[in-house]
Image: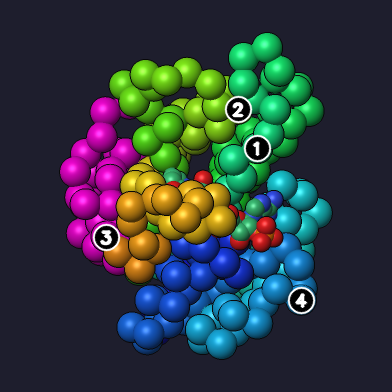
């Protein structure tokens, strides 16, 4: 049975990924931060693991819990937008928190699970167009934009370092999606965005590894 590990799978797109993969017969391993928040994931057919991805001890515990489990896909979905990041009001601690969750955690999870990748061998991260230099016409959102731009570089670096092991990587852009983060005015529903990103991963080839790909399959510029 193909297996996927999804971070931040208790709500938003992470939960929708869990639903869709479980419905297709995948074994879904999902992480939540709050042990009490795993109900929807478990109802969706996922196995619930507690992990704050920014806490190295909890990542080590997750790895120990999943010892010997082969992963077709490691999906770094967990992310935060952050606060106090407009020009003139940037808070250093808040900025570093976004980097810890959105950039460093996917890299440390890749380090933790690279040896367990099997089958499709895909390490993916949900990035954002807000991390693209070419998309930045409005400024602001310094922490989130910088963290997602750096995440794209992490994904590119992993593509190079892990190619000898046959592991493919991809930075996914979901579009603007109606979740707690995206808000009620976003044009896309999670079902559509997630279905699109799943299709991108299903069609991923060695030539795509390290790329930044929109949910509709189009390649994005950095
Ligand atoms: P939500 O805010 O709905 O969900 C975020 C998820 O990430 C929650 O499960 C949350 O857990 C989890 N999370 C946050 N911090 C941590 C942490 N330190 N450790 C583990 N889990 C954590 O967001 P979305 O579903 O909208 O976003 C999913 C991904 O998509 C993110 O990476 C986001 O940046 C990206 N994205 C979203 C867009 C949108 O329009 N919605 C657009 C572009 C990118 P908890 O419930 O415990 O907080």
Q: How is the image coloured?
A: rainbow
Q: Mark 4 points at which residue?
A: 36
- Residue 76 in the image: state x and y as whole percent: 51, 53
Q: Residue 89, image x and y in percent?
A: 71, 18
Q: Report the front residue among 51 and 122.
A: 51
Q: How far apart are marks 4 and 2 (CA)?
A: 29 Å
Q: What element carries label 2?
A: helix
Left or right: 63 as drawn, with respect to 8: right
* Image point (56%, 32%), residue name: 144
Mark carried by residue 82:
1
* Between discs 3 and 4, the one toward the N terminus: 4
Does the Cβ of the disc 2 residue fall within 8 Å of ligand 1?
no
CA neighbours of label 4 inside 10 A, class few (<14), some (14 to 19), many (20+): few
| Residues at marks 4 and 1, CA–CA distance in whole angstroms | 23 Å
Badge 4 or badge 1: first in the primary sequence: 4
Q: Is residue 38 visible?
A: yes
Between 1 and 89, the residue placed more toward the observer is 89
Which quadrant would the N terminus be assigned to in this image? bottom left
Depth check, mark 3 against mark 1: the one in front is 1
Image location (x, y in percent) of residue 118: 41, 66
Mark 1 nearby-residue class (10 Å; few <14, some 14–19, many ≥20): some
Location of residue 182 with respect to 97 vertically, above or below: below
According to the image, label 3 marks what residue? 196
Is residue 205 one of those drawn in magenta? Answer: yes
Magenta region: 193-222
């Amino acid at each position: 049975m193909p297996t996927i590990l999804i971070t931040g799978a208790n709500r938003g797109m992470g939960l929708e990924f869990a639903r869709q993969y479980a419905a297709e017969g995948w074994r879904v391993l999902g992480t939540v931060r709050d042990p009490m928040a795993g109900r929807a994931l478990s109802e969706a057919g996922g196995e619930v693991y507690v992990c704050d991805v920014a806490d190295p001890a909890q990542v080590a515990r997750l790895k120990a819990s999943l010892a010997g489990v082969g992963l077709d896909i490691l999906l770094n979905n967990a992310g935060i937008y952050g606060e106090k990041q407009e020009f003139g009001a940037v808070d250093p601690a808040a900025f570093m928190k976004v980097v810890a969750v959105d950039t460093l955690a996917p890299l440390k999870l890749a380090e933790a699970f690279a040896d367990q990748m099997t089958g499709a061998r895909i390490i993916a991260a949900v990035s954002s167009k807000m991390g693209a230099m070419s998309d930045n016409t409005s400024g602001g959102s310094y922490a989130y934009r910088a963290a997602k731009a750096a995440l794209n570089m992490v994904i590119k670096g992993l593509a190079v370092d892990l190619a000898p092991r046959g592991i493919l990587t991809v930075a996914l852009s979901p579009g603007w999606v109606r979740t707690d983060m995206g808000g009620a005015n976003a044009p896309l529903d999670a079902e559509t965005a997630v279905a699109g990103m799943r299709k991108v991963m299903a069609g991923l080839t060695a030539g795509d590894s390290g790329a930044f790909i929109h949910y509709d399959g189009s390649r994005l510029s950095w």
